[in-house]
Amino acid sequence: MISVTAPLPPQAPRTLDDLTAGARHYAFYFLKQHGNIRPAFFFLTAEGAYGVMICALGDFGPSDKDTYAKLCQTVAIAANITRAVLCVEIWASEQAIPMPPTGSPQPPDVRPSEDPNRKELVCLVQQTCDTCVSTFLNIVRLDGPKREFFNLTDNTDMGRMESVPREQSDSRFDWLLPAAEPPPDIRAAARVWLELQGVDLKKLILKPHKRRR
C-alpha cells in the first residue's frame, strides 16, 4: 500500500509553500517517467521533520481511496503533522448541465470518466490544522496515439479553491490533519494501528530539521 521511493527536492522543505513546490516537482517527475502519478502525502511535523507517504496501489478505486485517506489521517495524528500537501491526479468534467425548471427532477450527475471532453488535472490539497485549499494543474499531453506527457500548467479556470468548513466537508482528501494537537495517548494508539497495517512510521520520516539555538 505504501511506498517511500520518490524524487525529492534538493533541500528539506520548511514551509507549506516548500511542500507544495516539492509536490509539484514529484507530479512532473512521475508524469514524465510513467504517464500518471500515484497519490502522495507530503508533510511537516511539529517536531521539525518532513516526510512523504506514496500510495503504491495500481488500481486506485473508491475503496483504495478511502483506505489511503484513513492512513493519511492516522499518520497525521501519530506524527503530529502540522502542514501537509496531498498530490493526486483527477479528472474534471467540462459538460455543462442546464438547471431544470423549478419542481422538475434534478439531472443525474455527469461522471468525469464518461465525459469525452474531460480534463486531466493534478490536484494539490494544501492543509494545516485550520485551513484547507486546493490548487489545480493542467496535465498537457502531446497529440498522437501515445498521448505522451509534455508539461504541467496552472489551471486559471479553477484556480485556488478553499474547502468547505471541516464539519461540512464530505471530501475524503480534505481536512486530513487533526484540528488540534493530539495528546500523547492518542498518538501512541495511532502508531500501534499503523504498525498493525504494516506501516513503519520511521521510514516515512525522511529527514529531521536541526533546530537553531
Image (cartoon, grey):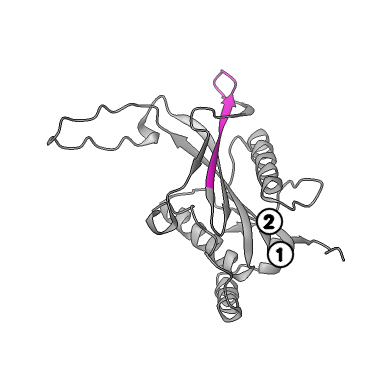
Left or right: where does residue 126 sit relative to residue 15? Answer: left
Q: Amino acid at mark 2?
A: Val
Judged from this view, the residue extending furthest toward the right is 213
Name which residue lies at 46% across and 47% down: 163
Span highlighted in magenta in the image: 133-147
Left or right: where does residue 82 sit relative to residue 161? Answer: right
- Asked whether 175 or 70 is in front, the reply is 175
Query: Would you name the residue on which mark 1 appears?
Result: 203
Name which residue lies at 55% across and 77% down: 186
- Asked whether 52 or 35 is in front, the reply is 52
Magenta span main SS? strand
Left or right: where does residue 118 sit relative to residue 47? Answer: left
Q: Amino acid at mark 1?
A: Lys
Disc 1/disc 2 C-alpha distance (Å): 8 Å
Answer whether residue 207 is magenta in the image. no
Q: Please say if 21 is above or below 166.
A: above
Q: Classify the position of the N terminus by image quarter.
A: bottom right
* Callouts 1 and 2 close, C-beta under 8 Å: yes
- Label 1 secondary element: helix
Q: Please say if 47 is above or below 112.
A: below
Q: Please say if 56 is above or below 33.
A: below
- Asked whether 150 or 173 is in front, the reply is 173
Q: Which mark is residue 4?
A: 2
Measuring from the top left, give residue 169's x and y in whole percent.
Answer: 40, 54
Using a 10 Å C-alpha cutoff, classify the residue at mark 2 as few (fewer than 14 neighbours), some (14 to 19) or many (20 or more).
some
Measuring from the top left, give residue 50's x and y in whole percent.
Answer: 72, 58
- Label 2 secondary element: loop
Name which residue lies at 71% across and 64% down: 203
Answer whether residue 146 is magenta in the image. yes
